[in-house]
Structure formats: structure tokens, C-alpha cells
Amino acid sequence: MKNKIIIFANTIWFLDKFKYELIESLSKTNIIECLYLRIGPFIDIKRKKVLEKKGINFKKVDLKFIINQLFNNLNSKKIKNERIFIRNIIVFTIGPILISSVIFAPFNEKIIIVLEGLGRVFSSRLIFYRFLKRFVQKIYKIIFSKCKYVLTLNYSDAAYLAEMNIAPISKINTIPGTGIDINYLKDSQKRFDKTPKYIDFIARSLPEKGFYDFIYMREYLLRHNKKLADNNPFRIITPSSDIDLLIKRETDFVKKSGIIIKPYISNPLEYYRESKVIILPTSYGEGISRVVLESIYLSIPLLVSRNQGTEEILPINYKYFTISKNPSVLIGQLIEILNDNEYIEKIFKKQKLIIEKFYSTTNSIKVFESFLN
């Protein structure tokens, strides 16, 4: 009889190759149940159907599910049987972490928590999040003391958890991000016809991601160098759900600036081939950014802020870490990087070798599976 592995994440994330391939790999020897709180910004229906044909179940965690699970937890005989049957419960992101600590309390020793970056709760400057951070730290400390492992996507987050005594050092481990599909990128590069024309922002349209820094860079450029602005259109690539909010809030402002808005798609190479520079002035608690990994691999210039993830995968002396969040300073750096392709090609060529060795999806899954029972 096969053991069962429960995977619980905030959204349905089947465009995430890491989780998709992880599920496929684990399903060969285990029964897999996927739990989620909401649909999320994107979903690949074809992949979902492929997984369902393999007998993988998908359940939405709503109030009814939570009540039923809490009721089941009162049945000691059922808990005893489930404890033998369940191999691991793998939990991603803050919402599922907090919910799992309640609904799967009898199985704490089976829970593996994956922090894909500490997130806005730990990095936002807003007063609300500063107070929330203190609360979450205390709850995390309780949860992490009972779970099996806490896996981070970079060493900086691991050090922070240990330093702040949020998790026992014996339970903290690091996996090399969620990786990228090296073979796919290698194959795609053979027919990768670059037609660079856009200055791109590829992320959630959140203040902590540097969204407003990006749009005011455009405003500054329009006023101070109209010719350069005309020759370098700006583009925002963000989830469809964020686009809906943008239309309600900032549509007139963004249209006036001439910024193009596009949704996330399943094949980002469609966008990458048109990117002159990708700008990510985030103050967010990032993990290992897939956009940064893929951009390095495709030699697309990156103007990015220093954070846990970017410092881990870019050289420490990289010239184009942002030196300020002031849009006028960012424009100065943008002008420099637009004329520095030789440097980008040279330094990213070296980084590609590191990415191939340590940051492939295949390698990340191999490391991850080593922590399962």
C-alpha cells in the first residue's frame, strides 16, 4: 500500500515547473493530495488534467474543509491510522503554514515547511506589517519547534531564522530555490531570436516589489529625456488579477505614461526575447527569483535591488544592483546598463555555469526529496 503525501499551497500553481515536477516525481511511489486556498494568478489547465489522470486529488481548503478536518482530529482511531499512512505534509507560504498548524496538529512531526522567501510581512515598511511581523514571528516559533523541517530557498533566510531564534537550527535546511528548466532554456536558445525593445518589470504589482518606483522612472524619463523615453517603451508583466486592480486604480496614470501592461503567460520566452532590460527594484523578502535566474541564463541585463535571493545568484561585485530607490537615480543606472552589453554578456556567461550546476529544477527536486522520510 502506498503512503500519502499532502501538498498544501496558497494557490494552484501548475505553471511552477518545480512543484509540477515534484508532484509527478512523488506520485510514482506515493498517493498525492494537493490542497489550495485559491485559484491564484494563473493556472495551466492542461497540466492539472494530466495530474488528475494520474490519480492526484485536488481540494480547496475552505471553512467546510477546515471544520471537517478539525472534527476528524477528534477521532483518535482515525488519527492513529492516518499517522501510519501519511508520509509527509509539505506546506508552502504563510497562509497554509498557519492553517496547517491547526488542521494538521496531530501530524506535526510529518510537516515540512517551505519558505519561498520571508515575504512582505517581514520586509514591508508599513506599520501594519511591522506589528503583524511580531505576531507571525511568535506563531512561527511555536509551529517551527514542532514540525519536521523548515526549508528556505536561500542561506540568508536560514541564518535569519536561526539568529532570531524563530526555528531550531537543527530543523533549518536550505534548497537551491525552485530552479529553472535548464534543458528547455538550452533548446530554446538555439532559436531565441532577440528583438529587444522594452524596459520590463516582471512581478506582482505591489509597492514592495518596486512597482511605483518603476512607473515613476517612466514619468521622470518622459520629462527629462523624451527621445530616450520614445526609444525605450516601458512594459509591466504581472498576474491578470493585478491587471484588474490596475485598471480600477491607476489605469489613466499608466496609460498617460504609455506603459504597456501584459499578463503572465505559460511561455515567458515570448516576453524575454523582447526585453532590453529587466528592472526589479524590490524591497520584498525574496527567495531565489526565477525571473533573475532565467534572465541571467538568457543574458538579459538586470537592474535589481540587493536582497537575499539576488545576492546569492549574482556576483557580489555586480555593477547593476540598485543604489537607490529614487526614480531619477534608477534612470541613471538604466542609461548605463543600456550601453554595457559587453559587460553583461561576459559576467552572465560565468554565472550560467553556476546556474547549470546548482539551480536547475532537477537538482532542486533532488535536494528537496532528500528531506522526505
Image: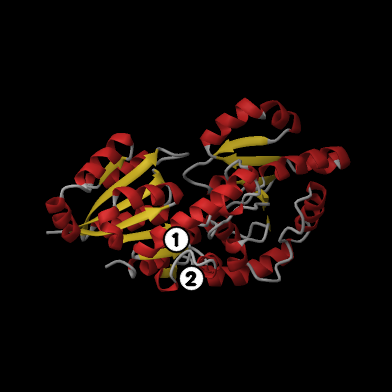
Q: Which of marks 1 and 2 is nearer the N terminus?
A: 1
Q: Which residue is drawn at 48% across and 56% down?
A: 138
- Name the residue tied to disc 2: 358
Residue 174 location (% of width, % of height): 46, 68
Tell me which amino acid carries mark 1.
Lys
Q: Nearer the viewer, residue 360 or 220?
A: 220
Quarter of the image holding residue 354?
bottom right
Tell me which amino acid carries mark 2.
Phe
Residue 41 numbered mark, or none: none
> Mark 1 and mark 2: span between their CA atoms?
30 Å
Question: Would you say 58 lies left or right of 156 here?
Answer: left
Question: Would you say 275 lies left or right of 333 here?
Answer: left
Q: Count all numbered tags in the image, as a single digit.
A: 2
Q: Height in image: 343 above or below 283? A: below
- Please, what secondary structure does the residue beneath circle 2 have? helix
Image quadrant where one finds the N terminus: bottom left
* Circle 1/circle 2 CB separation < 8 Å: no
Judge the density around disc 1: few (<14), some (14-19), many (≥20) Cα neighbours within 10 Å.
Answer: some
Judge the density around disc 2: few (<14), some (14-19), many (≥20) Cα neighbours within 10 Å.
Answer: some
Residue 117 location (% of width, % of height): 52, 57
Question: Would you say 367 lies left or right of 284 here?
Answer: left
Q: Height in image: 281 above or below 262? A: below
Q: Nearer the viewer, residue 123 or 176?
A: 123
Image quadrant where one finds the C terminus: bottom left
Q: Is residue 362 visible?
A: yes
Quarter of the image holding residue 256?
top right
- Name the residue tied to disc 1: 141
Residue 267 location (% of width, % of height): 49, 46
